[in-house]
Image: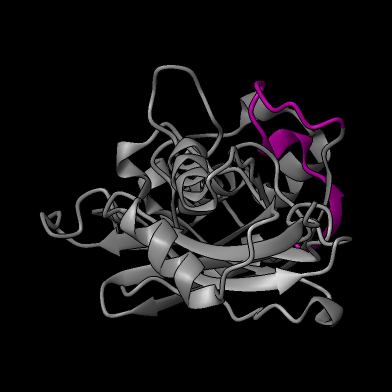
Amino acid sequence: MKKNVKFACKVEYDGCGYAGWQSQKNIATIQDELEKSISYVANHQVKITTAGRTDAGVHATSAVFHFETPKHRDKKSWIFGINSNLPADIKIKKIFQVSNDFDARFSAITRSYRYILLQSLSSSPILNKKVYWIRTKLDLEKMQKGANYLIGEHNFNAYRTSQCQAKHAIRNIHKITITKNKNLVYVDITANAFLHNMIRIIVGCLLQIGTGNKKPIWIDEILKLQQRNHIGETTPPYGLYFVGVEYPKKYKIDNKITLPFL
């Protein structure tokens, strides 16, 4: 009997047509599409484990998952075979053979996301469901000052939804940077892990500061208060992109962050 081989895959997808990553009954999900395709190529039922489950409508340029199989194929055969059986809005970009102790979720050191805002008087039909349109001019310097309060290890209970199933809200944000290129504003955030809707809630709070409704210190006040009901909007999912996962060097996985084409 052949021993199982473990592979880690980088996957890119447009989340608009799916109810998120996690498998659900009678509705399209990223996990179901991938498992169906990989199982077809491997000729046996395959289950995958991801570094992070994205919500409905959230995109990814470099999400990571792993699977095991006794089938031995070269990397190109896996990529071509899997992709030929996937819909056009989900594609494997890279594949790595990893050691048996690797786990896409538990081996991850950090996860990185980018949220994209379109600051313009009119919306963009081409970028519809790819960015979040904002009419109001934003003060990026004040937004960055507010974001800086979140860097480090904190209890982020105020920055998660009531549906969040995480056992605790302690997370460590390594960095948040807010930049602009023409009329696109980027919020880049890296942390050891995230809570349900955490990034979208953070961006919603930063917009309150950027539009002048709140002062930067408000971010810290909410953080210390630890009550979600004092925060404003949760921004839409379609402006959010999962752009990379960092793993220990021993696994020899490309840790490069892949930013959206925008």
Residue extending furthest toward the front: 1
Residue at x 20% of width, y 59% of height: 127
Q: Which residues are magenta?
A: 151-167
Residue 160 visible in the picture: yes
In the image, residue 220 above or below residue 95: above
Instruction: Residue 187 in the image: state x and y as whole percent.
Output: 50, 65
On the image, the x and y values in percent for residue 128 come to 19, 51
Please state which of residues 88 and 206 is positioned toward the viewer in this rendering: 88
Seen in the picture, residue 146 relative to 160 is either above or below; the reply is below
Inspect the magenta stretch and tell me whether residue 156 lies in it.
yes
Q: Is residue 222 above or below residue 105?
A: above
In which quadrant will I find the C terminus?
A: bottom left
Q: Within the image, what quadrant is residue 81 found in? A: bottom left
Please state the horizontal and vertical placement of residue 218, each as a whole percent of the image.
66, 48
Q: Is residue 123 left or right of residue 25?
A: left
Q: Determine the residue positioned at 74% across, 61% down.
A: 5
138 and 260: which one is in front? 260
Residue at coordinates 73% horizontally, 61% vertically from top-left? 6
Q: Examine the structure image and report whether residue 7 is included in the region drawn in magenta.
A: no
Quadrant in the picture for residue 138: bottom left
Residue appearing at x 82%, y 82% in the figure = 249
